[in-house]
Amino acid sequence: MNHQAPINLRDLFREDRKALIALALFFIANLAGTWQRWTQPLISQGREVSTPARIINGEKLYTDIQSVFGPFAPYFNAALYKVFGIDLIVLKISGALCAIIILVTIFWISRRLMSVWKSTAATAAVIVICALKSTANYIQPYSFAALYCLVFSLAAMAFLLAYLKTGKKRNFLWVGLFLGLSATAKLDSALVVLVTIIAVLLLDVMEHRRLPLQEFLYLSVSALAIVCPIYGYIMLTTPLSVLLKNNYIFLFNIPSQVLHFNSILSGLAKWPTSFWFSLSGVAMLMIWAGTGALLGALISHRKGDQWRELLGIGAILLAGGLIWREISILIFQTSPNNTPFASAIFVLPVIIGRTIIIVWRNRKAGRQTSSDQKILAVISIFSLLSILRAAFNVTISGPFTPFLIPMLVVGYIYLLFEIIPALFIKSQSVRIHWQQASALLVASMILAMAVNSTIKLRRENTFQVSSSRGSFITSNEIGEPLAEAVKYVREHTPAGASVLTLPLFTTLNFLADRDYPLKEELTLPGFLSDEKEMEAIEQIKSHNVNLILIVNITTPAFGNRVFGADYNLELMRWIAENYHLAARFDPKTVRNGGGPKLGDTQFFIMAYEKN
């Protein structure tokens, strides 16, 4: 299982250039296939493009603009706007460059553990599952804070693995640097990096019976050199009460509705069904491994006697996995849309525990633990901590997936290609046939997902929304009302006017080039509660808002579905008393049918003008 490339980057590119060229072409093909269809305007993306523009206009993060993340992304994107102009293409290019950095880093990390073709498979899988998928992508992510944090986190992991390979303690200077940068982007994700680093240092203590003081010093100095000035400045210039009360950067005072959303995301809201869903991920892993073994047996049946053993193993794994999966669906009512990744909450602790046992035994025997084993443990620890937010609900769809599972993909490719075959078959030649068959399966999955995402996006997203600040292609159901609303706002309000969009969808403000009056760009359930609702009304008055747009977006995941009916009733009552319905924007398909009402599933926008 030793296929490592040298650490030297020149050697890496010399040996792997064909694989990197193939991956680049695959990425470009997927980029072209999904061209301009990366924007999902209903998933927080208004905040992502609008906040940097507000900063350029003189507003201050945390004081004038609510934020749940660190300062890096909005200020970095504001700097990009300042240099290149306020346009969607600027952030799309930034997202694409981040995607390239992430993919190159994933390939590099994979090569510390696997051969070129296995690393290529892992990276290609990350392209179709994370970088350019129909449900989410890195080009226009739900959060640039999450994207930049992932770039920094993977860079920190790369230097941590370089330390495990070479033993050079100065790598911790770079680990600390990228840890600090990740903390300025997204604190909770930076904790994943920090705990992984601590775990590596503890393994070091266990193996070498020494305190890694020099490593800790390098780490601390470089990390604090980034974190202290930035967060120190924020603490000095922003009242603590504002940070804790109006923002959730330090994870204080989080609304109960957000906690409810997190319980749904983690799967705990559907316990114990989510437990069985995750356990059925083991069944999917068995199905994939069993199918690979059966195909491997067919490949090797004329090349040795052990093919019958491989055939039997494959049949048992496949049959067991299929039976297990059907029991989960029929008896425990789990979703049939499952993947092996759902099993991560069970599989990863086993790998980590096995590493601890190996390190402990080797220490007692006076042996060194292989760097492969420690690298696998680091990947497993990082992956486990990353998926904790979706512990019993790990899927390959949704806006959060690209930021939770890229390292998990690497670990599972290694599991499928190396660990599982080695557990069942001693013959290296027979294992190679199993690996070749598994590679064929994975390649088929990758191509199928790439084609499916392209077809899905091109079939569903056909309406181009354009403005002086950029364009994108989205569905007719969203694009038609949005385009008409943008036109209406520009025609009925002067430049520089404030327009309020509720409960979210400030994409509209960005495209129309109109100011947004509230601190909260997302007025989701719990974000404007109690006195904050009254403060919002006062802000509307002080900004002399003449036009308010109500967007029909339901939010059942937050416990309250409908703005103005299930939450923020007082704000909606005040709007109804002081404004009147002046226009409504529906998709063409419903314009002659009376139109849906607030709380229905159909998307539409209502424009209220001041009395």
Image (tube, rainbow, N blue to C red):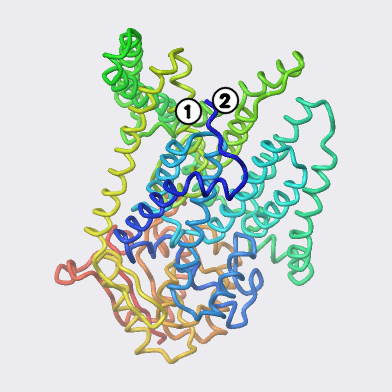
Give the image quarter of residue 215.
top right
How many residues crowd mark 1 within 10 Å: few (<14), some (14–19), many (20+)? some
Q: Nearer the viewer, mark 1 or mark 2?
A: 1
Q: Position of residue 254 (x, y in %)?
A: 61, 53
Dot 2: element: helix
Q: Quadrant of residue 378?
A: top right
Q: Is residue 52 left or right of residue 557?
A: right
Give the image location of residue 403, x and y in percent.
51, 49
Residue 112, quarter of the rendered image: top right
Residue 42: percent from left, percent from top: 39, 62
In this rendering, the answer to whether 48 lies above or below 415 is: below
Residue on which the image places disc 2: 351
Q: Can residue 257 be seen from the camera position used here? A: yes
Name the amino acid type tagged 2.
Ile
Pointers 1 and 2 in contact (C-beta within 8 Å): yes
The kind of residue on which mark 1 rests is Leu
Q: Can you say whether 210 is above or below 301 in the image?
A: below
Q: Residues within 10 Å of mark 2 (few under 14, many from 20)?
A: some
